[in-house]
Image (cartoon, helix red, strand yellow):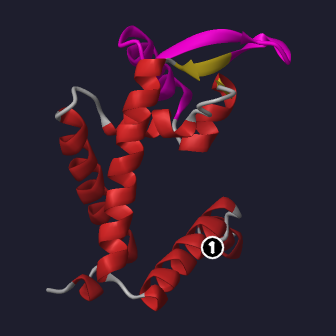
Amino acid sequence: MSLKDKTIDYVLRTTWLAVNKMYNEEAAQFDTTMATGFALLSIDPEEGTPSTSLGPKMGMEATSLSRTLKTMEEKGLITRKPNPEDGRGVLIHLTDFGREKRAYSRDRVLTFNEAIRDNVSREELSGFYKVAEIINHMISNKKIYNQKEKILK
């Protein structure tokens, strides 16, 4: 049975799980995880990033992000500093070690993207991005389930 015979959510889920597994296998060689690599890439290496904006930027729940940041701090990848713009807030900064691991993570992501681009036409990739954009737009604007629920009432 080809992927064309599967539901859209099945293809999204299994593809994401494969990508997730691949990145975690790569990261494990360096005693880290994909979540840590993603966090490293989401932190501004020069200015730092407010901790409150990291969760939404990464699409991560606060509790998961909190655990990831705690582990990153314990491993010496990041430091937390008071945000001069907001007395209650905290800026997450990369350490030199964090910058080094960030460069590695960036290289892994670029390698993945390059490999896909070498095997997919520009038109196919454009179509993939367009479909993903439509799915995200429909979900964020509640155009899937809320519409049906209104009709049923």
Percent x, y for residue 32? Answer: 28, 29
Residue indicated by mark 1: 148
| Residue 131 forms part of the magenta stretch | no
What residue lies at 18% left-to-right and 43% top-to-bottom?
25
Q: Where are the magenta residues, as a range?
A: 61-90
User: Is residue 42 visible in the rendered structure shown here?
Assistant: yes
User: Is residue 7 visible in the rendered structure shown here?
Assistant: no
Quadrant placement of the N terminus: bottom left
Above-or-below relation of 40 to 23: above
Percent x, y for residue 109? Answer: 38, 53
Horizontal side of residue 127 vs 145, given as left or right? left
What residue lies at 66% left-to-right and 70% top-to-bottom?
143
Q: Nearer the viewer, residue 12 or 79?
A: 79
What residue lies at 82% left-to-right and 13% top-to-bottom?
84
Q: Nearer the viewer, residue 59 or 108?
A: 108
Quadrant placement of the C terminus: bottom right
Q: Quadrant of residue 54?
A: top right
What residue lies at 33% left-to-right and 72% top-to-bottom?
116
Above-or-below relation of 30 to 143: above
